[in-house]
Amino acid sequence: MAFTTVLFDLDGTLIDSIQLILDSYHHTLAVHRLPARTDAEWLAGLGTPLSVQFRQWSEDPDRLAQLIATYRQYNLSNHDTMVTAYPGVVEMVGVIRRAGLRTGLVTSKNRTGALRGLRHVGLEAAMDLVIGADSHTCTYGALGAFSTGVGSTDMAAAWVLGETWFRVPETIRVMFRGRLAEWVGGKDLILRLVADLGEEGARYKALEFTGETIEALPMFGRFTVCNMAIESGAKTGIIPADEVTRDYLDGRAARNGVYYRSDPDARYARTVEYDVSGLEPLVACPYSPANVKPVSQVEPLPVDQVVLGSCTNGRVEDFRVAAAILKSRVVHPRVRLIAIPGSQAVFRQLLSEGIIGVLAEAGATISPPTCGPCIGGHMGVLGPGERGLFTTNRNFKGRNGHPTSEVYLSGPAVAAATAVTGRITDPRVLMG
């Protein structure tokens, strides 16, 4: 199956993934009995429909190939060693990023953090087929695109062949009806579904989100819903493109999309329906996104850290919700509040609206766009025995830091209220 867009984030997949992808690329050539290519030839002649974005990564392919070869001479298994210790790697990354600016491929160093920033570049449109080197590539389903994450090997094969293979998934139709209450949003919708389906209940199926609640849901909430489709094992989550989608893509997408809807007689593996008019803010407790309870039923445990942002809840509107609670309040003295805008564009908008000021005055630490604590990488990794409440998408044991730490997942309203009180808090109680 030919694809429309390939997303590869240099920072998100880490430098050592370059070696893995290149090795997989050469292996794929051999398996398909295609002529061998040097790394320089790979850079100069990729075979994907989006290859124009990658062909000019380097004005000097031979030099970049030399840098890659130098990098390969080092033992990359020692992850305690900083990447900058490898001769040539910094220069190689710089070449890729400079070329990215020249060709329109934006890398996370310059403007974004992983997939949530690339979304602003305009590479995706409705009904595209998108693959990315991140399991939460399914976020683009909010645009009406079929999008899914792949591993480094599949990514390399896609670059070689210009196509990839999928078994067409069965579809589970998810219908949400009713008007959402105050402080309830897209995060609560998807947590409700994941709680019912479990971590594997939609394995290799497509989740099609429909109903009057979805139709009324703003784009930022739609991104959140589709982002966590993978947490139930789904291959993708998709919302039929409509006027909300069209308005969002206007001025963002570099080309027009195709707007399809399911046939009236379409057959589904199953249909699940929810009346969400009485839904309250939800919290996923350790150690699973499916271990969900209403916030009113969660013990008000003290927390050490609150993370607001990520690819799940890092859009401007998410921070507006949090700012409405944090305004004229301060973060509890025991709590670290880390705010992570989803992209540099989001940061600039938050700055212009004065929301960065609200967060700073409340005592939050403002981070650059990054996966950071969500993947247990940096900028908020939890220590032994610490407890955090994050607006991210996963809370498996040890994912966000020390194996004895705990992470609860919620939307931005619960996160902001918790940051103020120092305990897991229902925003309805705090705000009266």
Image (cartoon, rainbow, N blue to C red):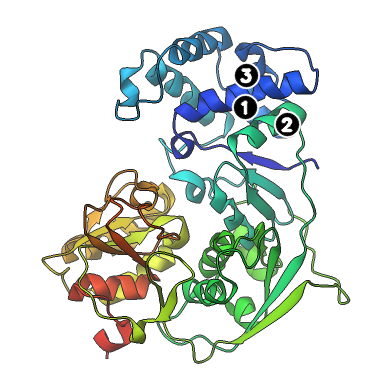
**Identity of the residue drawn at 41% across and 56% down:** 310
Residue 373, horizontal then vertical, whole percent: 33, 51
Is 115 left, or right, of 94 in this rendering? right
**Residue at 53% across, 29% down:** 100
Do the residues under discs 3 and 1 have CB atoms within 8 angstroms? yes
Q: Is residue 128 left or right of residue 122?
A: right
Q: Which mark is residue 54?
A: 1
The residue at the far front in this view is 404
- The quadrant of the rendering that contains the C terminus is bottom left
Distance of mark 2 from mark 1, alpha carbons?
9 Å
Q: Are marks 2 and 1 in contact (CB under 8 Å)?
A: yes
Q: Is residue 275 visible?
A: yes
Compare marks 3 and 2 and give the one earlier in the sequence: 3
Which amino acid type is marked by label 1?
Phe
Q: CA distance from mark 3 to mark 1?
A: 7 Å
Identify residue type, mark 2: Thr
What's the CA distance linking mark 3 and mark 2?
Answer: 12 Å
Secondary structure of residue under mark 3: helix
Residue 250 in view here:
no
Q: Say which mark, if any, is on residue 43.
A: 3
Q: x, y (%) of residue 33?
A: 80, 18
Vertical placement of 275 versus 373: above or below?
below
Q: Residue 55 is drawn in which quadrant?
A: top right
Q: Earlier in the sequence, mark 3 or mark 1?
A: 3
